[in-house]
Amino acid sequence: MSDEIKPDELLDKIDYGPRSESGSKSEPASWMDTSVQIRPGMYCYAAKAESVETLSLPNARPWNPLEDDWKLPDNWQEILHQGIKDRLEKFRTFKVFMDICVRCGACADKCHFFLGTGDPKNMPVLRAELLRSVYRNDFTTAGKILQKIPGGQKLNGARPLTLDVLKEWWYYLFQCTECRRCSVFCPYGIDTAEITIMGRELLNLIGLNIDWIATPVSNCFQTGNHLGIQPHAFKDMIDFFVEDIEEVTGVNVEPQMNIKGADILFITPSGDVFADPGTYTCEGYMILFKYLKDKYDLNVTWSTYASEGGNFGFFTSHETMKRLNAKMFAEAKRLGVKWILGGECGHMWRVINQYMDTMNGPADFLEEPVNPITGTKFENSKSTKMVHITEFTADLIKHGKLELDKSRNSNRIMTFHDSCNPARGMGLLDEPRYIIENCCDHFYEMPPNTIRELTFCCGSGAGLNAGENIELRMAGGLPRANAVKYVHEKFGVNTLGTICAIDRAALPTLCEYWVPEVEVYGIHELVGNALILPGEKKRTEDLRFEPLPGVEEEEDE
Amino acid sequence: MNQKYLIPLTAVFLLFLIAYTGVEGAGLQWFFGIVFPYVAIIAFLAGFVYKVLGWASSAVPFRIPTTCGQQKSLPWIKQNTIDNPNTSTGVFVRMILEIFLFRSLFRNTKAAFNRNVSNRLSYSWEIFLWLGALAFHYAFLVTLLRHFRFFTSPVPSCIKFLEYIDGIVQLGLPGIMLSGVVLLAATLFLLARRIFDAKVTYISQAADYFPLFLIIGIAATGLAMRYFTKVDIIGIKTLAMGLATFSPTIPEGVGGLFYGHLFLVSILFAYFPASKLMHMGGIFLSPTRNMANNTRAKRHINPWNYDVETHTYAQYEDHFREKMVEAGLPVDKPLDKKE
Ligand code: HEM
Ligand code: SF4
Ligand code: SF4
């Protein structure tokens, strides 16, 4: 990646004044007249045909976004027209959001992609207008009449669905991370993420997915997780963590896998098993479960079949989301557990919190979740019967059920990144903060406009965490990184905490690019370091095999 | 670019002139005073109902509120019951605040990027859009309500009271009604924003300028009648009462300016359902705001939920059984000992 754009070059490009594609500012042409230029660094590769075929999704074929011919089916316009029509009936959101935007511009400078690229079509309102212009033309009475009058289309801000328009949809719908920040500010709650979701669903009807979504989806369907880790390999990886943890703590934390009759089924994104620094978070979960087993005889099982918490189907279509999500309840039923515990992940929790029970419920074979150790009823999840691990751990800490040695994390000067989906699709804000405060000595918030429900996306969500679109990711992540940099400079923050597997994959790259001195930690990595396991040896290293604070000095003495 | 506001501006002028000359020159009072107002009201009502029923007939498959605060969680964690409601009471409060106070717009910020040593992105609170929008809408509402004195006899006391309040700030001039002045000023501010804020200019369509010019035209002709020219109020009341009681009459001595005003209002009504002005109805039906965030506690039903093909555990185990057994993972069906 030697041709990768430098941070300074990227910053030089930022300009929030509208401009034409060529960058000239003088007389910006109407956005409808500037056709799309698909630029390397900003787009993700096309879906491989095999991956699209796994789920028998339509129009699988090899194609290349940079070529003129996208090898579309002959009747692609008809397919999309029908697709829009169906979705207008099936989703009130879509229909209302197509009709009521007043173009007040309140959402315009709220999108991290606009803030990082200055590209006016990354203003949420324009991203939505890309579809709305076609909607106005083909689906409104006014549009149908005005079409026939010369100049009427233009007056109406309408346009027919041409190949150019389609390409523009594709380019900009895959420059939205479905983070919903725009929706917080819109006076009508218009959620451009919802429009992107519809748009991507439409693109999938004619086989226009990106490979970074299609291949994980295909893997997840067949193998149980996005990364395509087969059961024996999954077990190997976990065994490997067992060894590492034993080296650090002296305790064997061997977890249970696919065990029938366990109390709780635990599901986390496979990213946590696969790559640093998510692996340390995974080790944190394992240490916690071992502790609960030894102290309170709680049996938690993992599953290799339901070994994916995340759901890239959500970035494909509602149907694909449902097909992948079905495994969670199915596996819980097969194993006969009482309820399900979910790991740290962002979009996974949007799916669980707002879709899962509706799609694949009712989960009447499970029990209303109760923490057997504290007796706390998780009232907020009594129907879906799935609890977030930070809700669970926070409850344990509050009841004094965990022995924590905060000092082991005392070299971590923390800040916390709210992931978009838990923040704006759930409202899980204070639970992780409570855990951080109980596991670390130093915690500083980023500026108020960049956290909680106003949090900025990592820039790589919704399936955009690929390598080929690195410029897009670094630009989209700028507002996040900029706020991290601020607390780094002001308070010496050296650790960015997060509860999302995509964050754990994306933020290290982002930090390396914009604030290289900051490391990324999952919240349960902090728990894993702080938690005092029964019978553990004197720890000298943290889970990353770095010396614990104070240890080096002691040895020097 | 220019087209986008020149055409709507010209259109509003022309509409006014059509009514003015139609009345002054061609004596078409019956059309502009009776026929078109009725047509407009019918179009408004029918269109509004049609549109709202259209939205209501679309399903709400998922419960997807945008959560803007702490969820209901453990008993000792303080929930934000308004911005992340889990009950219908919470949703009700949230909606009231959205509809009457534009709560989401109140959050508005303005982003700025300083390309210097610190390269800071900063966000400052931007309240003017909220202020302008609120001023405009309330002025519009009050003005509209005040007009009921033309359509009622005797005038209900609440309308009289509203007038009294509206006229309480006299601004040094007796007889001034605050709402009319604020309406014009706020609309001009919103227009200025569209013309001078480059981002807003860029996203604006002719359909954004047209209602603004129309309302400016209505406010301007209204203010002109009230403060600058003498119009025959008795005559106008006769016409309005005639319309309201379905026994329309055309009084003598009411001039073209009034018919111009009335025509622009009629156009606004007729145009309403086909335009973005329908946000008035839409805001009530917006699923990201009018639903409780309680799907995990209470199952939401999708009316068109259908079965999908999944990859079952049995299929999975069939595929991987050998490898699973080798790795010591439990299986449902033992390996066939064929060899
Ligand atoms: C429940 C009733 C209503 C609510 C909650 C509401 C809310 C809003 C909000 C929040 C805005 C965005 C801010 C802005 O751009 O100024 C707006 C814009 C607008 N509203 Fe309403 N509105 C309502 C009814 C109406 C009605 C009855 C009209 C009729 C004339 C109207 C005309 C407009 C116009 C013309 C704009 C755009 C202003 C611009 O171009 O900047 N609204 N409305
Ligand atoms: S804030 Fe809402 S109404 Fe305003 S431009 Fe954006 S989407 Fe449209
Ligand atoms: S959902 Fe997020 S990424 Fe998409 S338009 Fe809105 S702010 Fe931008």
Image (cartoon, rainbow, N blue to C red):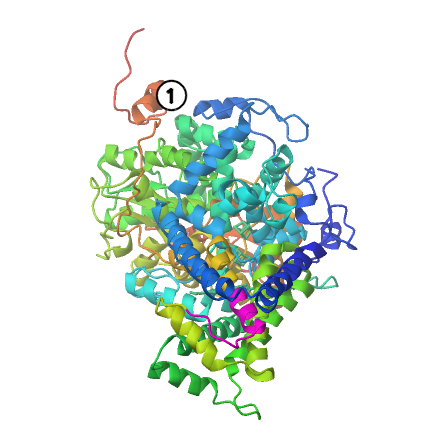
Residue A45 occupies quadrant: top right
Is residue A270 visible to us here? no
Above or below for B280 versus A46: below
In percent of width and height, residue B196 lies at: 69, 65
Question: Which image quarter holds the C terminus of chain A?
Answer: bottom right
Residue A68 left/right relative to A367: right
**Residue A325 seen in the current view:** yes
> Which segment is the magenta one?
B249-265
The residue that label 1 is drawn on is: B323
- Taking the magenta stretch, the answer to whether it contains residue B291 is no
Q: Is residue B110 left or right of residue A291?
A: right
Check the image and report above or below for B246 versus B66.
below
Asked which secondary structure carries label 1, the reply is helix
Q: Position of residue B210 (x, y in %)?
A: 59, 60
Which residue: 62% across, 71% down? Answer: B188
Task: Give A508 or B190, whichever is nearer the viewer.
Answer: B190
Q: Residue A334 placed where, x, y %?
A: 24, 32
Instruction: Please give left or right for residue A294 compared with residue B55 in the image.
Output: left
Task: Tell me the quarter of the picture where residue A70 sits.
Answer: top right
Position of A100 with respect to A235 (left or right) is right
Q: Give the amino acid type for the residue marked by disc 1 in the picture.
A: Lys
Q: Nearer the viewer, residue A181 or B48?
A: B48
Q: Nearer the viewer, residue A430 or A20?
A: A20
> Picture coordinates of residue A372 (x, y %)?
22, 52
Q: Residues within 10 Å of mark 1 (few under 14, many from 20)?
A: some
Residue drawn at x 28%, y 12% is B336
Numbered label tally = 1
User: Within the magenta stretch, is there residue B257?
Assistant: yes
What's the residue at 35%, 26% (across, down)? Answer: B311
| Looking at the image, residue A32 lies above or below residue A259 | below
The chain identifier of the residue carrying mark 1 reads B
